[in-house]
Amino acid sequence: MKEYELKYGCNPNQKPAKVFTQEGELPIKILNGRPGYINLLDALNAWQLVKELKQATGLPAATSFKHVSPAGAAVGIPLSDVERQIYWIADDMKLSPLANAYARARGADRMSSYGDFIALSDVCDIATAKIIQNEFSDGIIAPSYDPEALEILTAKKKGAYCIIQIETDYIPTPVERKNVFGITFEQGRNEVVINDELFENIVTYNKNLSEQAKLDLTIAMVTLKYTQSNSVCYAKGGQAIGIGAGQQSRIHCTRLAGQKADNWFLRQHPKVLNLSFKEQIKRADRDNSIDIYISDDYMDILADGIWESVFTTKPEIFTREERKVWLEHMTDVSLASDAYFPFGDNIIRAHKSGVKYIAQPGGSIRDDNVIETCDKYNMVMCFTGIRLFHH
C-alpha cells in the first residue's frame, strides 16, 4: 500500500486527506478500524519512542500518546502491590513484562491517557491486550499481535478499534519535509542516540549517579525526543511520572510536569487507596474523582449531595498539610529537560517533587546559578550537550 485515504485531516472541514509515501510502500498495515489523521501522527511518533526505548534499555517498552505527545512511557519492570492498585490491575492478574510496561505508561497520568493511542515495542500478548480491553483507547500500533490478543482488541469499540501493524525493519529517509502555509520545510531526521554516555559530564558537587537513575533519565530523555516542546519529564522506577509538553515558558513546563508527578505519588496515599467507590462507577469517573479529591478543589466532590453519587461512605478531607507531608516522602526522582534550564527556579520547583537526578543540555548564561541551586539540594546534574526540541 503506497497511499491511505483518510476521512479528513485534523478537523472535519480539512478535506481531502491522505497519507502516502514518495517511494516504496507504507510500512504500516491497518488490521482493524480506520485511523484518522491525528491517530496516525500519534501512532508513528509513539512507535519511534518505544522502539528507541527498547534499544536504549533492552526492556519491553510502551507509551500512551495523546495529541502528538506522550501522556506516559515506561519499560517492563514488575508492578508493586500499590502500583497495581492505583493502575486498576487486579491482584490475581498475571502480567508479562510488556503488560507491566503498558500498565505503567497508561497509569502514570490516567486523566491525560483517556482515549490514548498505544504503542508497544514488542508483539502484543494476551496479558497486555487484557489490560487494554478495560481502558478507553482509540487505537494501538505494534510489530505484531498474538492471535488471541488480536481477537480481544478487535472486539473493542464495537469492532471499530484501530489496530495497526508496523514493519520493524522500516528505515525512513534521512530527510524530513512538511508543508506549512504552502511553504516546504526540510531538515535531517533527529537521529541522536540516547545512552549512558550522555550522563558522563556531571557538573555538580554530588556525582553519585545510580544505575536506576541512569535508566530513569534514559526514559525521560527518549520521551522528550517525541514530546512537543518546550518539555520536561519526571521519571521514577522505570516510567515517566510527569510530562509537561508544549509550554512557552520552561518554568511553567516544570511546574505542570511536577504537579502531574505529585498527583502520581498522592494517589498512593492510604486515604486515596481506601476510597470506597460505588460499584457502578466507571473508571474514568473514578480517575476524575481522585484527581479532584487530591486537589484544593476537593469540596467539588465531597460536598453533600455530590459525594453520595460516587462513594459508599463520605471520605475524610485530604488536607493540604497532609498532602505536603506525604510528598516529602517522594525521593530519588529523575528529571530531564529538552533544552537548558535558564534559571534556578526550575531546580527549586523540581526539588519539591523529590528530584535528585537531572539531565539537561547546559549552555545557559546562568548555568552557574543552576548548578549552585542543585548543589544546595545535593542533587546530581549532568550536562548532555543535546537539545531535544520536537515540533
Image (cartoon, helix red, strand yellow):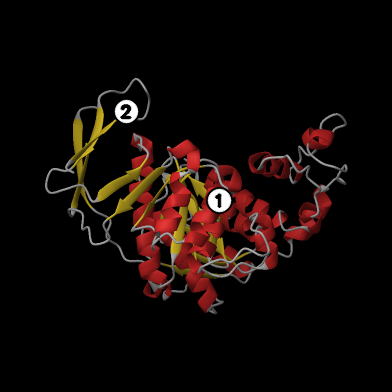
Residue 281 drawn at (x, y percent): 72, 40
- Res. 339 visible in picture: no
- Residue 254 is tagged as 1
Q: For mark 2, give the secondary structure.
A: loop
Name the residue rendered at 48%, 36% in the picture.
158
Q: Secondary structure at mark 1?
A: helix
Between 388 and 300, the one nearer to me in the picture: 300
Cα separation, mark 1 vs mark 2, equals 37 Å
Number of residue marks: 2
Residue 22 circle label: none
Q: Are marks 1 and 2 in contact (CB under 8 Å)?
A: no
Q: Earlier in the sequence, mark 1 or mark 2?
A: 2
In which quadrant is the C terminus drawn? top left
The mark closer to the camera, 1 or 2, is 2
Q: Relative to 64, say whether 282 is above or below.
A: above
Q: Position of residue 208 (x, y in %)?
A: 55, 79
| Figure check: 215 above or below 302 | below
In the depicted view, which residue is nearer to us: 11 or 376? 11
The residue identified by callout 2 is 7
- Residue 145: percent from the left, percent from the top? 38, 57
Image quarter in which the N terminus is found = top left
**Amino acid type of disc 2?**
Lys
Crowd rating for badge 2 (residues with CA inside 10 Å; few <14, some 14–19, many 20+): some
Q: Quadrant of residue 224?
A: bottom left
Label 1 neighbourhood size at 10 Å, few (<14), some (14-19), many (20+)?
many
The quadrant where residue 81 appears: bottom right
Q: Is residue 140 left or right of residue 297?
A: left
Please, which residue is most extreme toward the left here? Answer: 23
Residue at 68% across, 39% down: 285
